C-alpha cells in the first residue's frame, strides 16, 4: 500500500520534505539582498548618469538596501498578524505577490532618483516580512527537534540565491567584462551606455523569475496534520531558568495510536521547554534586550561587509568578472556557513555558537583591508571567510526566538527581535553617508570590528548568566 503523505518514508515525513524544498524556493527569492553588494556599482552608476540623482555616491546608495531592512523590521510584527485570518500558505502567497511586484516596479523608479528606488526597493521588505517568518515556522513544525539544521538549510537558500543571481545579473548587465571608467575620489563608476541601458531591465527579469519560483515553492508547501508529531520528555537537567532542559524523541501519532512498542532513546540535543511567551512578556524579558543589543552591533559589521566588499575591491582589482565570481563564491560560503552554524547550534545550543561566530567574524573583518596588499587570492579567501562567518548570527536568530520565547507567538516575537535590523541598518546608512569619506575604507572596517567586540560582550552576558546559575 502506498504510504500516505503524513506517513514516514526513510524516517522522514514526506510532507515535511516537500515543505523544506518549497521553503528553499521561497527563501531563494528573498535572497535578493545577497545580490546587492554585487549590484550596487551598477545601480549607483545608473542613478548618477540616467536620473536626477547625479551626485549620488556608494555611501548614499546604502539607503536603498537600508530601506528594505527598515520596512522588513517595522512591518513584520504587524503583517504577521494576518496569520490569525489566513492560512500559512495564504500569508506566503500575499508576501510573494508584494515581493515580486516591488522588485519589478524598480524598473520604473530607477529612472527618477535614488529616493524612488529606495521606496520601491523598501517595499520588498514588506513581502519578506510576511513570507519569511511564516515559512520558517511551518518548517519548524515539521521538524521540531532540528530547528538549528532547518535554520541552516533555509538561510542556505539565501546563499544559493546569491550564487546564481550574481552570475545572472553580471552576465546580463556586463557580458563584456567592462571596468568602471570614471573615478571620483576613492570611488569608481560605470558610464558605458551599453552597460547602463540594461540596468532597469534586470528588475523585470528578476521580478519574473521570483514570481515563477515563488509559485513552485507555494505549491510544495504542506501544513502538518494536527498531532502528527509530538515531543516526548525523556531526561531532565538543571537549566539557568530553573525549569530544566529535556531530551526528546519525536514519535508519530500513527505509531502511538496503533499501540506500537517504542523504545525511547534521548537524542544528543536538549531543549528548554517552550515557554510560549506573549509579546508583552518578551518585552519584559532581560534576555530579549541582551540579544537585541548583540544583534545591533553585530548587524552593523554585517552591513559594512554586505554593502561594501565589492566597491572596496574595485579600488585595487580591475576585473568585474572576478569580483562577480568572488560574490558568487561568497554566496557558496553563506550556504556552507548556514549549515555549519545551524548544526552546531543544534548540538551545543545557540549561546556558545553566537560567541564563537562573533570571534571568527571579528578576526576577518578587522584584517580585511590588508587584502589590498595580498591581491586577488587573499581578497577571495577573506570575502569567503567573512560570508561564512557573518551568516552564523543570521542563521540562529529564528532559533533564538523559538527556543527562548516559544512557538505560539513565534512570528510576532521574531518580528520584535528583528526590529534590531531597523536600528543597525539606519545607523549604518547614516554613518556611512556622513563619515565614510572622512575615515576611509580602513576606518570603516576597523569600526565594524570594534562593534563586534561590543557584540561579543553582550553575547557573553547571555552565556555567563546561564553559567553562574548552574553553579
Image (spheres, rainbow, N blue to C red):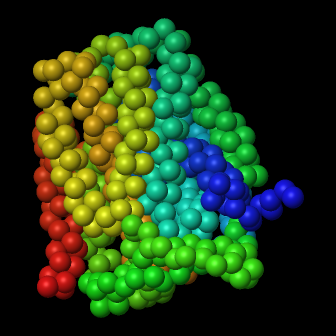
Q: Residue at the location (49% across, 16% down)? A: 174
Q: Residue at the location (41% across, 48% down)? A: 338
- 414 vs 333, left or right, is right
Q: Quadrant of the C terminus?
A: bottom left
Q: Nearer the viewer, residue 41 or 333?
A: 333
- 448 vs 284, left or right, is left
Q: Nearer the viewer, residue 354 or 327?
A: 354
- 18 vs 360, left or right, is right
Q: Residue at the location (13% across, 52% down)? A: 450
- 62 vs 248, left or right, is left
Q: Is residue 65 visible?
A: yes
Q: x and y percent of residue 366 in the render?
A: 14, 42
Q: Is residue 122 visible?
A: no
Q: Quadrant of the N terminus?
A: bottom right
Residue placed furthest toward the right: 1
* Image position of 215 with respect to 142: above or below: above
* Image position of 354 with respect to 254: above or below: above
Q: Quadrant of residue 306?
A: top left
Q: x and y percent of residue 394 in the render?
A: 38, 55
Q: Quadrant of residue 353?
A: bottom left
Q: Quadrant of residue 247?
A: bottom left
- Give the mark count: 0
* Image position of 148 with respect to 267: above or below: above
* Image position of 56 with respect to 215: above or below: above
Q: x and y percent of residue 397 in the render?
A: 39, 63
Q: Residue at the location (34% across, 56% down)? A: 344
Residue placed furthest toward the bottom: 242
Q: x and y percent of residue 361 in the render?
A: 23, 47
Amino acid at each position: 500500500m502506498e504510504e500516505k503523505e503524513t506517513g514516514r518514508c526513510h524516517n522522514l515525513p514526506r510532507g515535511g520534505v516537500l515543505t523544506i524544498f518549497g521553503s528553499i524556493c521561497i527563501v531563494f527569492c528573498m535572497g535578493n539582498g545577497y545580490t546587492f553588494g554585487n549590484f550596487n556599482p551598477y545601480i549607483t552608476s545608473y542613478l548618477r548618469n540616467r536620473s536626477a540623482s547625479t551626485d549620488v555616491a556608494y555611501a548614499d546608495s546604502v539607503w536603498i538596501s537600508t530601506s528594505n531592512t527598515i520596512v522588513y523590521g517595522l512591518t513584520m510584527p504587524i503583517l504577521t498578524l494576518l496569520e490569525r485570518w489566513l492560512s500559512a500558505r495564504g500569508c506566503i502567497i500575499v508576501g510573494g505577490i508584494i515581493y515580486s511586484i516591488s522588485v519589478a516596479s524598480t524598473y520604473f523608479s530607477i529612472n527618477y532618483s535614488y529616493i524612488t528606488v529606495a521606496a520601491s526597493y523598501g517595499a520588498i521588505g514588506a513581502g519578506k516580512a510576511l513570507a519569511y517568518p511564516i515559512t520558517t515556522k511551518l518548517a519548524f513544525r515539521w521538524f521540531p527537534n532540528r530547528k538549528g539544521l532547518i535554520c541552516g538549510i533555509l538561510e542556505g537558500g539565501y546563499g544559493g540565491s546569491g550564487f546564481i543571481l550574481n552570475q545572472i545579473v553580471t552576465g546580463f548587465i556586463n557580458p563584456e567584462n567592462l571596468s568602471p571608467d570614471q573615478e571620483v575620489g576613492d570611488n569608481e563608476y560605470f558610464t558605458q551606455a551599453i552597460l547602463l541601458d540594461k540596468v532597469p531591465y534586470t528588475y523585470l527579469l528578476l521580478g519574473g523569475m521570483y514570481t515563477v519560483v515563488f509559485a513552485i515553492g507555494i505549491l510544495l508547501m504542506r501544513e502538518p496534520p494536527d498531532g502528527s508529531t509530538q515531543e516526548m520528555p525523556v531526561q531532565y537537567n538543571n537549566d539557568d531558568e530553573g525549569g530544566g532542559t529535556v531530551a526528546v524523541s519525536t514519535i508519530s501519532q500513527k505509531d502511538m495510536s496503533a499501540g506500537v512498542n517504542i523504545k525511547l532513546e534521548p537524542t544528543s540535543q536538549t531543549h528548554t521547554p517552550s515557554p510560549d511567551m506573549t509579546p508583552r512578556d518578551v518585552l519584559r524579558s532581560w534576555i530579549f534586550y541582551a540579544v537585541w543589543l548583540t544583534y545591533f552591533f553585530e548587524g552593523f559589521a554585517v552591513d559594512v561587509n554586505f554593502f561594501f566588499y565589492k566597491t572596496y575591491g574595485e579600488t585595487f582589482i580591475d576585473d568585474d568578472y572576478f569580483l562577480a565570481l568572488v560574490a558568487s563564491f561568497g554566496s557558496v560560503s553563506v550556504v556552507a556557513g548556514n549549515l555549519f552554524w545551524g548544526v552546531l547550534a543544534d548540538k551545543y545550543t545557540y549561546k556558545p555558537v553566537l560567541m564563537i561566530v562573533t570571534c571568527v567574524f571579528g578576526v576577518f573583518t578587522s584584517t580585511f583591508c590588508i587584502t589590498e596588499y595580498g591581491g586577488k587570492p587573499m581578497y577571495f579567501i577573506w570575502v569567503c571567510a567573512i560570508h561564512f562567518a557573518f551568516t552564523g548570527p543570521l542563521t540562529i536568530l529564528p532559533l533564538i526566538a523559538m527556543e527562548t520565547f516559544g512557538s505560539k507567538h513565534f512570528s510576532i516575537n521574531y518580528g520584535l527581535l528583528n526590529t534590531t535590523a531597523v536600528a543597525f541598518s539606519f545607523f549604518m546608512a547614516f554613518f556611512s553617508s556622513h563619515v565614510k569619506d572622512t575615515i576611509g575604507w580602513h576606518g570603516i572596517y576597523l569600526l565594524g570590528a570594534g562593534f563586534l567586540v561590543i557584540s561579543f560582550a553582550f553575547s557573553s552576558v547571555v552565556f555567563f548568566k546561564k553559567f553562574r546559575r548552574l553553579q
